[in-house]
Amino acid sequence: MYKILKKQQLTPLIFSMEVEAPRIAQSAKPGQFLIVRCGEMGERVPLTICDFDPKKGTVRIVIQIAGVSSNKICSLNEGDSLTDITGPLGKPSDFMEFTPDSLKSKHYLFVAGGVGAAPVYPQAKYLHSLGAKVDVIIGARNKDLIIMEEEMRGVCTNLFICTDDGSKGEKGNVTVLMERLVNEGNKYDMCVAIGPMIMMKFATLMAKKCNLPIIVSLNTLMVDGTGMCGACRVSVGGKTMFACVDGPEFNGYDVDFDEALRRQTLYRKEEQQADAAAGLDFLVRK
Ligand SMILES: Cc1cc2nc3c(=O)[nH]c(=O)nc-3n(C[C@H](O)[C@H](O)[C@H](O)COP(=O)(O)OP(=O)(O)OC[C@H]3O[C@@H](n4cnc5c(N)ncnc54)[C@H](O)[C@@H]3O)c2cc1C
Ligand code: FES
């Protein structure tokens, strides 16, 4: 059992939880994720490691209510426990292969859509701690859906906010800001985009237009998270890959986003039925 030490509500549908998990906290790296279960018959829910503290023996998850299982996890309180956590899973971010010294002079652009701010946070934190220049764009539909703004400000050089309705920051989506920053003369060594699949598709198209290399983190359907079930299959550079073990980060230019978008909706009917049965009809995403 993994005890929840701290719970915070970030928006009506997004919660942050600090969970006691000493062994995972010892080995976690930016870019990796966990599979969390709530209840003996609970579904396996993949969630990014948003932060980890090896000294305290804790990991932090930031979770959005998207359906029945995420709602179950979010309904737990401080003092309650998650039934089990598997991880860290997936490959650490690409830059973890480089020496800290070689990263000092790099200029990164992170693009976070909605709850994508959670996976961006540990990456920006690591690079910023080494002295790299880190620009972060956080985009959301409106100001109430912007999360982790102040924390992110503490781990980056420049923070840019945009909202679809203009209620905070620049009006428009993240690609508008990406283009502006490049046109203003910023020479990025790498862009990393994490958020809804559709956002990552359009961020990749903009990166191509701006001649910018881009990495995306794929939030495909996952079951085992260990490369055996095939649920997370994606086509990358014409090859079949499994996001849980070959990723979740991939070169955006190589990802077949249209196939990935189609596969994400494979169980939509069943998800809607489960939402209705659990009284979660307020979930507007479907
Ligand atoms: C590597 C990875 C990291 C993730 N990190 C986070 C995170 O940090 N915070 C966060 O809020 N969400 C994260 N997600 C998404 C999260 O796993 C889903 O929102 C969750 O599984 C939804 O389950 P549900 O039963 O609540 O909703 P459902 O109604 O079952 O599904 C809602 C939507 O969530 C997605 N989904 C459903 N089941 C799965 C599954 N088994 N695996 C992946 N996606 C699924 C589908 O797009 C689906 O349409 C991540 C996903 C992956 C693959
Ligand atoms: S989740 Fe089963 S192979 Fe990746």
Image (spheres, grey):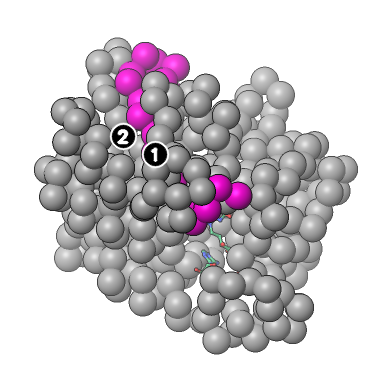
Say if mark 2 contacts mark 1, CB within 8 Å: yes
Q: Is residue 17 visible?
A: yes
Q: Residue at x 45, y 40 (%)?
A: 169
Residue 275, horizontal then vertical, whole percent: 68, 78
| Residue sitting nearer the eye, 51 or 36 | 51
The earlier-in-sequence mark between 2 and 1 is: 2
Q: Amino acid at mark 1?
A: Ile
Instruction: Please give left or right for residue 203 compared with residue 171 in the image.
Output: left
Is residue 139 covered in magenta?
yes
The extreme right residue here reads 79
Q: Secondary structure at mark 2?
A: strand
Report if the beta carbon of the residue with label 2 is closer than 8 angstroms to ligand 1: no
Kindly report the distance in space between the C-alpha atoms of the residues bearing marks 2 and 1.
Answer: 8 Å
Q: Secondary structure at mark 1?
A: strand
Residue 273 lies in quadrant: bottom right
Residue 125, horizontal then vertical, whole percent: 47, 26
| Residue sitting nearer the eye, 185 or 229 | 185
| Residue sitting nearer the eye, 6 or 177 | 177
Q: Residue at x 52, y 22 (%)?
A: 154
| Local crowd size for mark 2, using a 10 Å CA cut-off: few (<14), some (14–19), many (≥20) | many
- The residue wearing badge 2 is 109
Tell me where the magenta segment starts and ends, as one range: 126-144
Residue 242 lies in quadrant: bottom left
Instruction: Please give left or right for residue 107 compared with residue 194 in the image.
Output: left
Q: Looking at the rendered structure, which numbered label has been put on residue 59?
A: none
Q: Is residue 121 above or below residue 64?
A: above
Q: Residue at x 80, y 37 (%)?
A: 5
- The residue wearing badge 1 is 137
Is residue 272 covered in magenta?
no
